[in-house]
Image (spheres, rainbow, N blue to C red):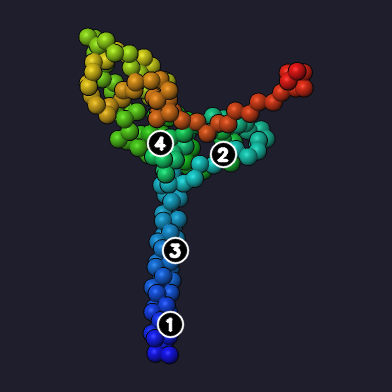
């Protein structure tokens, strides 16, 4: 009987500790939610769910704070929040100033390796010549695909439909 009471006491104590930790976590989340409207980089990306009259759907850039990168998405002109930028460069400069995508490329006139760098002004990954081990961690990528995935990811989903004739 005494052992059962002791076990029950430990269970109650553990439940109190767990519930108080949850309460502190919820309070912290509430504080962060109140701060978010002042920081566009902490807001969710608000994708277009409808068209506006006379507005239109536009390609825009928003900051994905969990991934630490700016992504391209569709935005409706009448339904936006402040996590919405015209260019990837504007998004990176506001939300991720230290991004390697904003750094100067480390190309060399004596380079012989084919590499890619992100041109933030053109929002494009461009080829360059580089030397081995030059500027490790800078704006330099082995493949164009790596550059695009890091510096200009997209939330677009390509949906293709086929007619019955195309399947035969």
Q: Is residue 66 above or below residue 149?
A: below
Q: Of callouts 1 and 3, which one flags the residue occurring earlier in the amino acid sequence?
A: 1
Q: Quadrant of the C terminus?
A: top right
Residue indicated by mark 4: 69
The quarter of the image holding the N terminus is bottom left
Instruction: Say if 49 sits above or below 137 in the image.
Output: below
Q: Looking at the picture, how far across and down is residue 149, in whole percent? A: 43, 28
**Label 4 vs label 2, nearer the camera:** 4
Q: Which numbered disc, 4 or 1, marks the residue closer to the eye?
A: 1
Quick one: which residue is furthest to the bottom in this view? 1
Crowding at dot 2, Cα within 10 Å, few <14 / some 14-19 / many 20+, comes out as: many
Measure the alpha-carbon separation of dots 4 and 2. Answer: 16 Å
- Residue 157, numbered label: none
Residue 129 percent coordinates (x, y): 29, 12
Q: Residue at x 43, y 82 (%)?
A: 8
Q: Alpha-carbon distance for marks 2 and 1?
A: 50 Å
Label 4: which secondary element = strand
| Residue 6 to residue 89: above or below | below
* Mark nearer the N terminus (4 vs 1): 1
Q: Which mark is residue 8?
A: 1
Q: Nearer the viewer, mark 3 or mark 2?
A: 3
Residue at mark 2: 47
According to the image, label 3 marks what residue? Answer: 26
In the orientation shown, which residue stands out farthest toward the right?
A: 164
Q: CA distance from mark 1 to mark 3?
A: 27 Å
N-term-proximal mark, 3 vs 2: 3
Residue 100 visible to an observer of this rendering: yes
The CA distance from mark 3 to mark 4 is 26 Å
Secondary structure under tag 1 reads helix
Q: Which of the marked residues, 3 or 4, is nearer the chain's N terminus? A: 3
């Amino acid at each position: 009987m005494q052992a059962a009471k002791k076990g029950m006491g430990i269970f109650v104590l553990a439940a109190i500790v767990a519930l108080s930790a949850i309460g502190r976590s919820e309070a912290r989340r509430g504080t962060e939610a109140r701060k978010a409207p002042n920081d566009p980089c902490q807001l969710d990306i608000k994708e277009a769910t409808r068209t506006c009259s006379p507005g239109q759907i536009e390609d825009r850039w928003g900051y994905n704070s969990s991934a630490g990168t700016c992504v391209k998405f569709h935005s409706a002109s009448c339904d936006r929040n402040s996590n919405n930028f015209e260019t990837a460069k504007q998004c990176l400069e506001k939300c991720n100033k230290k991004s390697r995508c904003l750094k100067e490329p480390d190309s060399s006139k004596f380079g012989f390796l084919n590499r890619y760098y992100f041109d933030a002004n053109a929002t494009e990954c461009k080829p360059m010549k580089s030397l081995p081990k030059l500027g490790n961690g800078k704006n330099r990528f082995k493949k164009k695909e790596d550059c695009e995935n890091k510096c200009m990811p997209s939330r677009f989903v390509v949906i293709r439909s086929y007619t019955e004739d195309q399947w035969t």
